[in-house]
Image (cartoon, grey):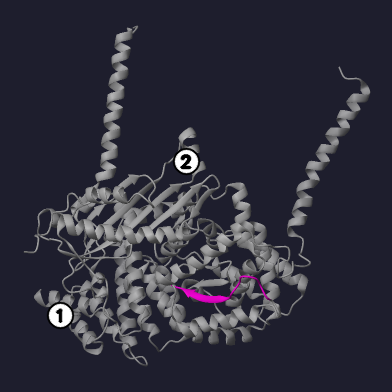
Amino acid sequence: MFPKKSTSLIVAALCFCLVLTSFCPLAMAQKKTAPVEATPPPIREEFKFGKIDLEVLEQSDLLDSKLERDGLVLHDEPANAYLRRIGLSLVPKGLDLERVSWNFRVLRDPQPNAFALPNGSIYVTTGLIFLIDNESQLAAIIAHEMTHVMRRHTYVQNRSNRKKFLTMNIMAAVGTYAPGGIVGAVITVVTTVAPFILIATVYGYSRDLEREADLKGVDMMISAEYSPEEMVNVMKLLDKDIEGENIRLFYNDHPSLDERIKYLSSYLGARADKVTHQMELNRERAAYFGQMESVMRHDLQLAINAARFRSAVYLAQRLVDFHPDSENLFWLAEAYRTLGPRSPQLTEKELTNGAKKDAAKKRQKRTLEEEERELLETPVGKDNWQQHQQKAEEFYLRALNAENPVPAVHRGLGMLYEKLGRANDAASEYEKYIELAPTAIDRERIKRRIEALRRT
Amino acid sequence: MKLTNSVVFRLRALILVLATLLLIGFTSHSIHAQFLHPKIKSKETTIRTVVVFPAKVNVVRDSMKGPEGMAAESDELSARVEKTISEVLSKQKHVTTLSPSTAQSGQGDAQPNYNVADFQTKFDDLLPKIMKKRSDVKKGRFTMGDEVLNLNLDKGTDAIVFIRGEGKKLTGGKTAFTLLVGGVPAYLKLQIGIVDARNGEVLLYTDPIFGGDPTTAVDRLRKALEKGFKKLPPAQPTP
């Protein structure tokens, strides 16, 4: 039995623990949601280059040349110049960073993503360019990425990873998460050169570093007179999961999107900056689409190649809404034709984690042709197919009457009619295509198709 | 029932023999796995000329602090694998390797580069499906479609060779650690697909593998490739 004094002490200690455990989470939660008063300076003054950092820098330069050599960088000078103009307007005045040379490039990748290399190379994918609405949103992304460079996040993260042995299973992780499509190619390239860069740049930095980049990005946007609230809007846009993919890249996963929207809104509130008028944003949207229309069309072809048919329909519709009586109608027709028997939108059930995992497994097993055959055996699949083929034909025909019709409309109609079993119509459309585009890259393929159709 | 010592000894020996046989079977399968399209087997299609697409071989240096990229070495190895495959196909199978130069599209210089990149990606998409059931190559299940014609390769090209690979080189510390505690030793695993240049059908799939430092084991690479293409029927040597 305990003496009375000891018992009181134990009771007191228990009470103290109870109070502590009750208030700690509250205190921590308060700390988490507390508005941020100030962000750190743009440069990490105390940073000194070590041998390991120089290795990272060398690998980054190699990565730049490899992305270029592997045909993943888009050679669209106006688009790259536009990115450069936005990027350079965000650089704080008088900033001189050791071993950083700013380069802004568009990456041919239908998966919405962006990343920065520590040498100052900023990459934005065509998929992301297509998804966003205006220049301020693009500036938000670039500002976020530039902060990673200015604050030396890659080096900091790499040093930390080496200490924590975090890169041990990166190859296995890449094998698990790398999806198909061109994004797969980009991730493979990054892995080849520098697995540690992959973790940080493609899958996201640590929670604190991402938060720092978000908040500092807002500061940079304000200095360059961009609408800072577009940083929040771009986060919301990035949460769209059109394809039901099982992959979560850093923009929508690390920290969680809800958390990012919360702290960014809180930070913007604390800064009490002006909210841009909707009319101004609409004007900005029109200018942005006008500037990036060719990149968006390029991305549509990539999305179709990567079997991202639902994204293709969604994005092509955006293009048609922007510029209706144009080549964009052809792209909408292409998107519907290739969507085939698939549903244009995934249901809530199909967007659950379990359903996404099952879909990913099926994608690994079945070829696209097998998937279409299976779907066509179902009444829903048949119905979808009929509807989409009708829509495709309607848009192809409208595209023929649009301003400056492209010869590829005839190729699209040919492919549509070939699938519908209208051999003669298909052959004549193909012939018109060859006649109008005698130097087309796919002339040999189409000629063979004509021969085969004429034989039947 | 109590087993006598001799019965226990015989059982152990039997289990050991079975395990060894299984191991040999598994190893030889993984080393010599190669699958041919029925058209190749029946000699309806003969591969005489190929275009070898740039190999994507990725080697990492595995140290006690995790894997590190070896970009320059990976590039060097990729080029060596491409060259060795051409030599093996030429010497053993009388297959000529053509230059992969593609016709100009008239859409600027970047287009042929994009085209090759997109086909490499298309093969990357198809590869997991092949890996799921490699034996289906024998049923002619896999194809890249007639889009291969968009590459506008030389008219005489019969097939396109796609090469992927991954390997690991161990540092001294990691080698010692692996010997003491266990783990995956240094290796190189290749995945090679030969695709019909006219209709995109996958004509051959093989995945040779060998143990040892992938950046220096030149002879082992050649031997592994020779075994990897063993089943491919040779084209008639040109007189």
Q: CA distance from mark 1 to mark 2?
A: 66 Å
Disc 1 marks a residue whose amino acid type is Asn
Nearest to the observer: residue A273 or residue B203: B203
Q: Position of residue A339 (x, y in %)?
A: 35, 69
Mark 2 lies on a secondary structure that is helix
A123 left or right, relative to A96: left
Report crowding for label 1: few under 14, some 14 to 19, many 20 or more residues within 10 A (C-alpha).
some
> Which range of residues does the magenta coloring cover?
A96-109
Q: Nearer the viewer, mark 1 or mark 2?
A: 2
Is residue A101 inside the magenta stretch?
Answer: yes
Q: Label 1: which residue?
A: A424
- For image coordinates 62% across by 60% down, the residue present is A155
Rendering quarter of residue A14: top right
Q: Quadrant of the C terminus of chain A?
A: bottom left
Is label 1 in contact with label 2 (beta carbons under 8 Å)?
no
**Looking at this rendering, what residue extends furthest in the left direction?**
B239
Q: Position of residue A176 (x, y in %)?
A: 44, 52
The tally of labels here is 2
A360 left or right, relative to B203: right
Q: Is residue A236 visible?
A: yes
Q: Label 2: which residue?
A: B175
Mark 1 lies on a secondary structure that is helix
